[in-house]
Image: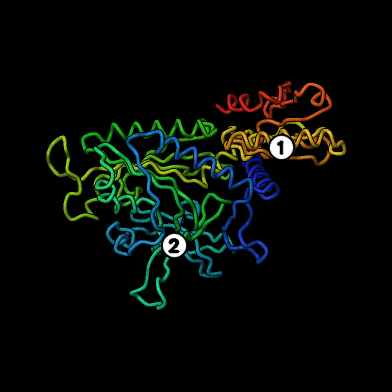
Amino acid sequence: MNQDQQQLDLMDKIVSLCKRRGFIFPGSEIYGGLANSWDYGPLGVELKNNIKNMWWDRFVRRRSDVVGIDAALIMNPKVWEASGHLKEFNDPLVECRKCNSRFRDVPELRTRREQFEGKDDFSWICRDCNTLNEFNPRQFNLMLKTFLGPVEDENSVVYFRPETAQAMFVDFKNILQSISKKLPFGIAQMGKAFRNEITPGNFIFRTREFEQMEIEYFVRESEWEKYFAEWQESMRTWLSDVGVDLTHVHEVEIPDGERAHYSKRTVDFEYEYPFGQKELYGLSYRGDFDLKNHFKEAPYNDIETGGKLYPHVIEPTFGVDRSVLAVLCDAYKEESARVVLKLKPKLAPYKVAVFPLLANKPPLVEKAKQVYSKLQASRSTFHVAWDDRGNIGKRYYAQDEIGTPWCITIDFQTLADDTVTVRDRDTTEQVRKPIAELDSYFVRMLE
């Protein structure tokens, strides 16, 4: 089996595990699904929320120079006119002349047919019916359109936001007036965004409905390079801390002509997914494009200089769903008889699982339930699992597969001395710990 096939098999295994163990389900599955719509199940929503909470804690709560907002999904259409999205937010679309399938124009589709007059002439091969087509793309706006109000006419057209960024620019003055901040400072937001992608795919990598974690960091023009470098390093550190292997990450400088219309510099953090190296995060220098377009007068009084200016913007963008996928890809391991998700403990859906050694022995079950209840009540950070199905070995392997860092077994020795067996997911080593010390022990381990 070649390496490419091994990687595709890995992707199939991850998708299968996600459905089987309650991480991610196909959306609307009982009605045949909806193309690239995915629902986060009981374990998936815990993993996703743990990533989001860790991000918010790090980049908002622990920083005195960043504040957060939570803005509406639907904004006045004039926002998207001012931002350039109505005019510029397009993808080239190609359509097969035989089967009418439509695809986003990407280099992998194209076939160089010949060269003439110093120019490359391309055709493209349809992925659905294998027909060779003339290369004749047309532009397709990616914003998802809907109508607001009871009448569906031109005056009621609105758009679901294609990014979370614009609300942070539109609310810039309100934030300055309500919370005193000096440059440099940032505004952060997490939330859903929508893009009418032509060819979504690769599980949760590219979907029409997705979630972002974004920061707009406002700086003086003369200092943008300094803060760009600082955010680039912060993004590297974040990736490492959530368990992404940095040897699988490539920082790619996006050249002129390929950047978004507002960007003066962009670095993409690309990850080696099983289906290829693709974008995970982005870091852009947006200049003063957005504030100049939204505000007719300079929106910021610079206390240090006494003048008015348009702050320039550094924008680190983190995809939530792509974060989940990258974390799962790097955490998935096959070790002899077991599959294990070696998630960072802080990200694991369950931190601890509690078992009675034997489910048919009432004293063990009662004692195990006492330990389970004690841990549940002791700290909000402990999401505790209970499992009394099957033999103890199968229970261990079941918890390994969903990434639970530690398992506690209540056995007959527990009844005698109030100690339990604590098993480590990664090493499979076991130690005895007093029940009275479990809370403080896991706090230390998580930190």
Answer yes or no: is residue 91 visible.
no
Circles 2 and 1: CB atoms closer than 8 Å: no
Instruction: Pinpoint residue 305: horizontal percent, then vertical percent.
Output: 13, 36
Relative vertical location of residue 413 with respect to residue 295 in this rendering, above or below: above
Quadrant, the C terminus = top right
Q: Secondary structure at mark 1?
A: helix
For this rendering, which residue is in front, 10 or 255? 10
Q: Which residue is mark 1?
A: 399
Q: Secondary structure at mark 2?
A: strand
Q: Residue at x 49, y 44 (%)?
A: 278
Query: Which label was assigned to residue 243?
Result: none
Q: Which amino acid is tagged 2?
A: Leu
Report the side of 64 relative to 132 (left or right).
left
Quadrant, the N terminus = top right
Mark closest to the chain's N terminus, 2 or 1? 2
Check the image and name the residue furthest to the left. 306
For this rendering, which residue is in front, 409 or 167? 409
Q: Residue at x 59, y 34 (%)?
A: 379
Q: Mark 2 or mark 1, which is nearer to you?
A: 1
Measure the C-alpha gap from mark 2 to mark 1.
Answer: 45 Å
Report the side of 11 relative to 365 (left or right).
left
Query: Which label was assigned to residue 93?
Result: 2
For this rendering, which residue is in front, 276 or 66? 66
Instruction: Pinpoint residue 237: horizontal percent, then vertical percent.
Output: 45, 30
Instruction: Pinpoint residue 166: horizontal percent, then vertical percent.
Output: 33, 53
The quadrant where residue 446 appears: top right
